[in-house]
Image (cartoon, grey):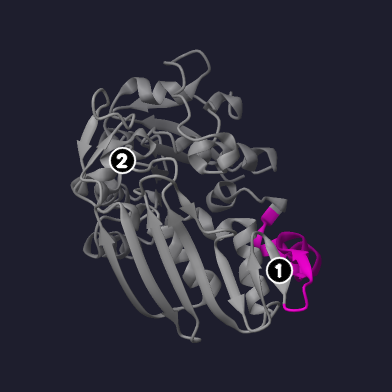
């Protein structure tokens, strides 16, 4: 019998909840070939917050409402909720965790500036690596990790939850099977929202500092949107774009008088126009700024074809007919495709990515 793979997690911030829920769903689906054996955070109490109920400090309050569907809104979870029989070591130095002999693979959920450092240490030590998006702070740093993984014969993966989402899979299937004819146009994004006009996004000041985040919305959100475009619309032929920093100072509570502030040296707004190799054009717009009132794009992302569109989770044709996108996908897609994209019946993107 093969021993379970031992996983060490570096970075115990809010996004960890989404990943742990994914691991719990794997366990509930009968996947028993892994154990999380180590947690690492700069502050020991941050790791203890996730190890056992009642052991560490209380969970952080959510920064987004559950109905948002955002991974940052995932409810708090503890490791002993789904692996009570496993001892979990706690570290404050990722190098010590990697060298401890307790892990076979590393999950890197640190800030972007640390990805190539944590990743290189893991790969040099012969550990498989799965890292949060984006892969690294620069193309050069990303290439370093790819080359290391290939040289060592190790698995290197990037957590990009967009591709695994059922509605994204459904949109890709609908376009490839001609449900709306030939794809012509796509529209992503909007202006403003919970963090506009000048709040610190997700209460994480590092997102607004170039040396820690690598960039602003174009890196944090744009990586999802561009991945979405490439997967659903096709490979990119050309791209033009621009970024802006409309709010050079952001505040924890949006109150310049009392809130914690951070000077932002990264973009809070991006716009891009993408053409695909098939001739379709996509417009991407996102802003954490925007005074007065937010302007979401209704039904976005929206995909227009030669005989209809995909909008607001529906397939809408020129004849006025409407069908639910995901329900149509489930009913009409080949069973082999559904089995491949949703193994064991799993639909949680984090569970699928971690399988």
Magenta-colored stretch includes residue 73: no
The residue where tag 1 is placed is 315
Q: Is residue 147 left or right of residue 82?
A: left
> Residue at point 66% right, 65% down?
170
Magenta span covers which residues? 318-343
Check disc 1 and report its element: helix, strand or loop: strand
What residue do we see at 25% from left, 55% from top? 137
What label does residue 282 carry, if any?
none
Q: Are marks 2 and 1 in contact (CB under 8 Å)?
A: no
Residue 352 appears at what percent x and percent y?
Answer: 59, 52
Q: Which mark is residue 198?
A: 2
Tell me the residue at 58%/80% (across/down): 183
**Of callouts 2 and 1, which one flags the residue occurring earlier in the amino acid sequence?**
2
Q: Going by the image, does 317 lie left or right of 66?
A: right
Up/down of 270 relative to 119, above or below = below
Please tell me how many numbered marks the rendered image carries: 2
Residue 172 in view in this figure? yes
The one nearer the camera, 171 or 131, is 171
**Which type of secondary structure does the marked residue at label 2 adopt?**
loop
Where residue 326 sits, quadrant-wise, is bottom right
Q: Is residue 336 magenta?
A: yes
């Amino acid at each position: 019998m093969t021993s379970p793979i031992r996983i060490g997690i570096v970075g115990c911030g809010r996004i960890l909840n989404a990943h742990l829920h994914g691991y719990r769903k794997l366990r509930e689906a009968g996947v028993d070939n892994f154990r999380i054996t180590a947690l690492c955070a700069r502050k020991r109490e941050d790791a203890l917050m996730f190890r056992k109920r009642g052991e560490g400090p209380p969970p952080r309050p959510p920064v987004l409402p559950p109905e948002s569907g955002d991974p940052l809104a995932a409810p708090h979870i503890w490791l002993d909720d789904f692996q009570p029989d496993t001892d979990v070591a706690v570290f404050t130095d990722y190098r010590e965790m990697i060298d401890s002999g307790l892990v076979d693979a590393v999950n890197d959920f640190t800030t972007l500036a640390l990805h190539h450092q944590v990743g290189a240490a893991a790969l040099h030590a012969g550990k498989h690596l799965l890292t949060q998006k984006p892969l690294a702070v620069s193309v050069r740093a990303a290439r370093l990790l790819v080359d290391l993984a290939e040289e060592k014969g190790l698995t290197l993966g990037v957590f990009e939850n967009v591709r695994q989402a059922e509605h994204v899979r459904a949109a890709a299937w609908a376009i490839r099977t001609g449900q709306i004819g030939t794809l012509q146009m796509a529209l992503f994004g909007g202006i403003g929202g919970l963090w506009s006009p000048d709040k610190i996004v997700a209460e994480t000041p590092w997102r607004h500092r170039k040396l820690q985040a690598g960039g602003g919305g174009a890196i944090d959100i744009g990586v999802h949107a561009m991945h979405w475009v490439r997967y659903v619309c096709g490979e990119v032929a050309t791209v033009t774009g621009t970024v802006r920093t409309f709010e050079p100072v952001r505040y924890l509570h949006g109150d310049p008088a009392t809130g914690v502030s951070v000077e932002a040296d990264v973009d809070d707004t991006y716009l891009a126009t993408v053409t695909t190799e098939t001739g379709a054009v996509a417009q991407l717009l996102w802003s954490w700024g925007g005074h007065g009132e937010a302007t979401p794009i209704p039904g976005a992302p929206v995909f227009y074809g030669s005989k209809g569109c995909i909008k607001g989770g529906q397939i809408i044709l020129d004849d006025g007919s409407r069908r639910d996108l995901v329900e149509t996908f489930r009913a009409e897609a080949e069973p082999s495709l559904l089995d491949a994209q949703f193994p064991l019946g799993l639909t949680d993107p984090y569970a699928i990515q971690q399988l």
